Image (tube, rainbow, N blue to C red):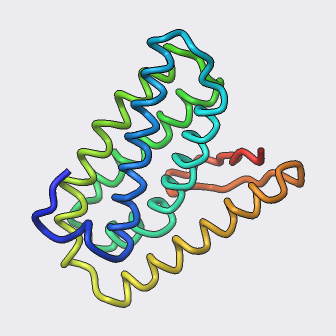
């Protein structure tokens, strides 16, 4: 990951970049356990929970604002499609083949965001846009933290920008 443009220093992109680091560390731990033929259930749950929250933050906060710029619409559509693909790959549980494929896709996805998306938008959005993205992040976290605090209450559906309805895990 680069540190050239300052997008990893503060605000919503710094938060997303920090989550990228956590996801990459979890990916490495998952690969190591898979290679050792160890159980990955607990780690898989942690990984997918973070990935789902992270993707929701991007889809509710950053991506709509970037689409408003009308310069990266194709890239945003591709990133959203990759979120959907990751969700599908991991939706069947800790299946080794699917987890390995998701980890590979996620690595490229993170690179695309860190080296292409973040540097292009860090100075393109207004301070008010960044404030709204920050509020969206807090709203997403509150939903996911509520789910974690009450795992057997009612799961909820979200419709993502792609129009796909996704049931977020509630436990």
Q: Position of residue 110 (x, y in %)?
A: 31, 45
Task: Please state, as top left, top right, bottom left or bottom right, where the C terminus lies in the image.
Answer: top right
Of 148 and 157, which appears nearest the observer?
148
Residue 167: image location, x then y, percent: 71, 46
Residue at horizontal 34 percent and vertical 58 percent from the top: 17
Most extreme residue toward the right is 153
Residue located at (76% from left, 57% from top):
147
Name, please, the residue furthest toward the bottom. 128
Q: In this picture, is 155 found above or below 36? A: below
144 vs 45: above or below: below
Q: Residue at x 89, y 54 (%)?
A: 153
Q: Is residue 94 left or right of residue 152?
A: left
Displayed quadrant of residue 14:
bottom left
**Residue displayed at 13% across by 68% down:** 5
Q: Position of residue 6 (x, y in %)?
A: 18, 71
Q: Quadrant of residue 95?
A: top right
Q: Is residue 105 left or right of residue 85?
A: left
Residue in the foreground of this view, choosing between 4 and 110: 4
């Amino acid at each position: 990951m680069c540190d050239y443009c300052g997008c990893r220093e503060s605000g919503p992109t710094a938060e997303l970049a920090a989550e990228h680091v956590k996801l990459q560390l979890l990916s490495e731990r998952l690969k190591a356990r898979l290679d050792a033929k160890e159980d990955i259930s607990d780690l898989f749950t942690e990984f997918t929970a973070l990935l789902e929250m992270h993707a929701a933050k991007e889809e509710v906060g950053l991506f709509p604002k970037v689409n408003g710029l009308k310069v990266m619409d194709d890239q945003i559509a591709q990133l959203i499609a990759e979120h959907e693909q990751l969700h599908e790959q991991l939706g069947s549980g800790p299946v080794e083949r699917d987890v390995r494929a998701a980890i590979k896709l996620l690595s490229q996805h993170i690179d695309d965001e860190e080296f292409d998306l973040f540097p292009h938008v860090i100075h393109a959005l207004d301070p008010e846009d960044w404030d709204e993205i920050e509020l969206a992040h807090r709203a997403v976290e509150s939903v996911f933290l509520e789910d974690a605090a009450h795992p057997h209450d009612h799961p909820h559906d979200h419709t993502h920008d792609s129009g796909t309805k996704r049931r977020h895990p509630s436990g």
